[in-house]
Amino acid sequence: MAITAPRPGAHLDGDVLHVTVPAAPSAEAVELCLPGDDGERRVELRRSGEVWTGRMDDVRAGDAYGLRVYGPWDPVRGVRTNPAKLLVDPWTRRVAGTVTDLDVARPFAGTDPFSSRRDDRDSAAVVPHGIVTADLGPAPTPRPQVPWADTVVYETHVRDLTTLHPAVPEDLRGTYAGVAHPAVVDHLVALGVTTVELLPVFAHTSEPSLLARGRRNHWGYSTLAYLAPHPGYASTPGREAEEFRAMVATLHAAGLEVVLDVVFNHTCEGGADGPSLSWRGLDAAGWYALDARGRDVDVTGCGNTLDAGSPLVRGLVLDSLRHWVTTMGVDGFRFDLASTLGRPRGGAFDPSTPLLGEIVDDPVLSQVKLIAEPWDATGEGYQVGGFPAPWAEWNGRFRDGVRDFWRGHGPLSEIVTRIAGSSDLYWPARTPAASVNFVTAHDGFTLADLVSYERKHNEANGEQGRDGTDDNRSSNHGVEGPTDDPAILALRARQARNLLTTLLLSAGTPMLLGGDELGHTQHGNNNVYSLDDETSWRSWSSPELVDFVARALALRRATPALRRTDFFYGREDTDPDGAAPDIAWLHPDGRELTEPDFHHHGRTLVVRVDGDRALLLVLHSGGAPVDVLLPDAFGDTAWTPVLDPGTTTGAPPDTDALPAGETLTVPAHTALVLRARPRT
């Protein structure tokens, strides 16, 4: 039966291809084009209201297709129609090819994007194409549906995770199938993570600035097609969608969720001096935030900003997200530079803007995990704590507070607030799980580098050190970079375990950077977005922290009080019968901290978390040992060490119970965890 509903995109019915292109209000004509060996077949689409529609016969799945738009050339108004430039359908579900000639792909003649002349060279041979696909049907597997309180995120890049994995066959390394290999799945399950967050897997191509320098975007934050999986991650060319779905099914069968890092803030076209690959040639003013002179408003630092207030953008975002849930089977999304979704036309952030509301109100999307990176490239975009429920957020305040504490900076109030779930940011509308806690992520130092470098070393990026943050809040512990000094190496290893302990045992949703458990180093480079080499590829030769992470996460699972669905109340929750508070903040001498203590730049914090078997966290960032009185004021009779950063696995060398009220000498730079004896 022929397709009659004007769904955006290209849809195959037998050998008939039906195409719907929303908007393009400046267009005088739109053509559907199928390049081929015998020339290009073209069909002119009909305008019907706000859409252009048409059909072409004798089309098969796997055929390449694109769009050509005829109309005026008025760059100052954002109108850049140029029929010489073949455009990718924004709703295509598969792409092939890349930009091989940036100059020909540009719509303007000369070097001025606001020139009065169009470039008449045909771009079809030098730009990507959409590919006709058959419908795949719904995703085949049920979801693990891990509760937020139990979620532990593992952030990784598809290619980086397996390119060097010795157990993954060479033809599967760096692919979706590689991620689904039993050796990789077993590793993730053994670690104790629940949710794999993949760096961008939407089809992408490199932005103009990289193409001009002969480089490419390795991370993938440069989207070309929002409904198409990236073909470069498929072990079998042309089977990327099927392979992606199989990967998701395998991870689901192991109880692991899949969350995608999605980029709806900008596209691969760059600024006005970039190419016309899709949106710019269709309707630049309808897709992008432009100023009064037709120039791109850039709050992303990537040359352009998709206009979150545009009906076109909102429609594509919702269609894309639903597709990845219902057809591809994913369990949620992490939104890159998510503040832009609340800044229509690049204006002030408003959490009640239509797009944010439409996402959380959607009957499909409301059932999956939604995580915001709550900032963009501008100061106005920093909105940590500013997103409405049910959004979770990457909590940059947690990262900074924990890094500062372990390098001896900042007041105790900051680390206390972050360990307790950041109620200052998320109470009362959300729970501690809304705080996605991390100390490292793809953007910045790895854990190994965080304890080995005090400044970035980004020379390999070819940008003369202009890229990457200078606010690393790191310590090299005496020597910048590699060293043979055994004392420094031992201290770095201990500090890495201290940071992990704080991350994995704090209230909130912990996120581990994939490769940190393997001791991966980027040699001090904190922005490896363009490096597809051993700098980025995870080394599996020295899994230094695997056992430690697994032990810490097992401890988290065994302690319900750390996986809270509400915030700690402290003394306010104490009943008249004298029950212990749900959390107590203690001085090393055993007394409870008072208000002045929290504003002190202390180096030692003792935290008692109540429960069936209370947990005691002793966090000591000082450079000399400290005596700590094991608390006895809450009915505890003895304490048993359960996690010790002094060993590589975290297994305490001595597990004898220590009497409450006894003084314990804690070594310098130590995050020690003890468990109370069961109450009788």
Image (cartoon, rainbow, N blue to C red):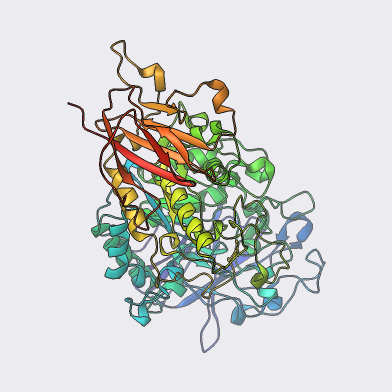
Query: Which of the pair 228/146 is nearer the observer?
Result: 146
Relative placement, left or right, of 626 versus 250 is right
Q: Position of residue 461 (x, y in %)?
A: 65, 70
183 in relation to 76, above or below: below
Q: Residue at x 60, y 60 (%)?
A: 453
**Quadrant in which the C terminus appears:** top left
Q: Residue furthest top?
A: 576
Look at the image and tell me whether residue 372 can be seen: yes
Q: Is residue 675 left or right of residue 77?
A: left
Residue at 34%, 22% (x, y): give it. 633
Rendered location of residue 620, percent (x, y): 48, 41
Q: Is residue 383 above or below residue 204?
A: above
* The quadrant where residue 119 appears: bottom right
User: Who's the residue at 51% across and 57% down the image?
Assistant: 492
Front residue of this view, candidates 515 and 616? 616
Look at the picture and state if 574 lies above or below 518.
Answer: above
